[in-house]
Amino acid sequence: MIYYNNDNLALRSMMKSDIKKLVDGFVEQGWHKSNELFSEYYNQQENKEKLVVIAEIGSDVAGYVTLLPYAKVGPFADKNIPEIVDFNVLIKYQKRGIGSRIMDVSENLAKEKSDYVSLSVGLHNGYGSAQRMYVKRGYIPDGTGVWYNGKQLVPYTKCVNDDDLTLYFLKCLKE
């Protein structure tokens, strides 16, 4: 399925051939994202468990996002609110509006199921650009505080500032 196609940028459903392109793209920028991860995403898409939207420039994969039909963990679990999960634009393609276009498509897809969409974002500075983008797009912290490994942290709990330390956000999609 093609969700967007303009100005040399296409946003479409994941194809099996994207797996290697994604793995290679992350290796090129010094990150490890496994073949198994993207194979699982592809299988989940094929089983209609999640949507996987691929951003493509020419024949290159530039980024992706996954969209769950409803949140499975966190403050919105079992509330029938879609959740944006694992959103990435490869570094060499950032600052071109690709991430914003991916978010537009994700929010439109979520709107088909709910008046809201949720996401969580890491708290260390590696997520700084994402944090800023989400706030500018109207995402609001849900008020449950910090979560770690899918569990809400009680006040004064010691934790590690890694990728699993997150804050949940909600956006109203109604106009």
Image: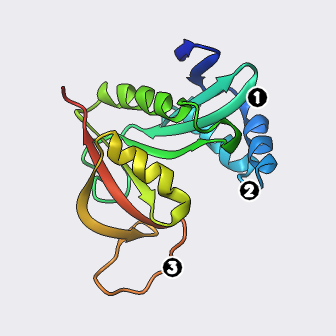
The tag on residue 160 is 3
Give the structural element (helix, strand or loop) at label 2.
Answer: loop
- Please tell me whether mark 2 or mark 1 is closer to you in this view: 2
User: In the image, what residue type sits under mark 2?
Assistant: His
Give the structural element (helix, strand or loop) at label 1.
Answer: loop
Mark closer to the chain start, 3 or 2:
2
Mark closer to the chain start, 2 or 1:
1
Q: CA distance from mark 2 to mark 1?
A: 18 Å
Depth order, front residue of 66/27 = 27
The vertical placement of 121 against 7, above or below, is: below
User: In the image, what residue type sits under mark 1?
Assistant: Ser
- Residue position marked by numbered label 1 in the rendering: 17
Q: CA distance from mark 3 to mark 2?
A: 20 Å
Residue 1 spot, x, y in % from top left: 55, 16
User: In the image, what residue type sits under mark 3?
Assistant: Val
In this rendering, does residue 118 appear at all?
Answer: no
Residue visible at 58% across and 37% down? 95
Q: Quadrant of residue 109?
A: top left
Horizontal side of residue 47 vs 143, given as left or right: right
Q: CA distance from mark 1 to mark 3?
A: 36 Å
Depth order, front residue of 43/105 = 105
- Please tell me whether mark 1 or mark 3 is closer to you in this view: 3
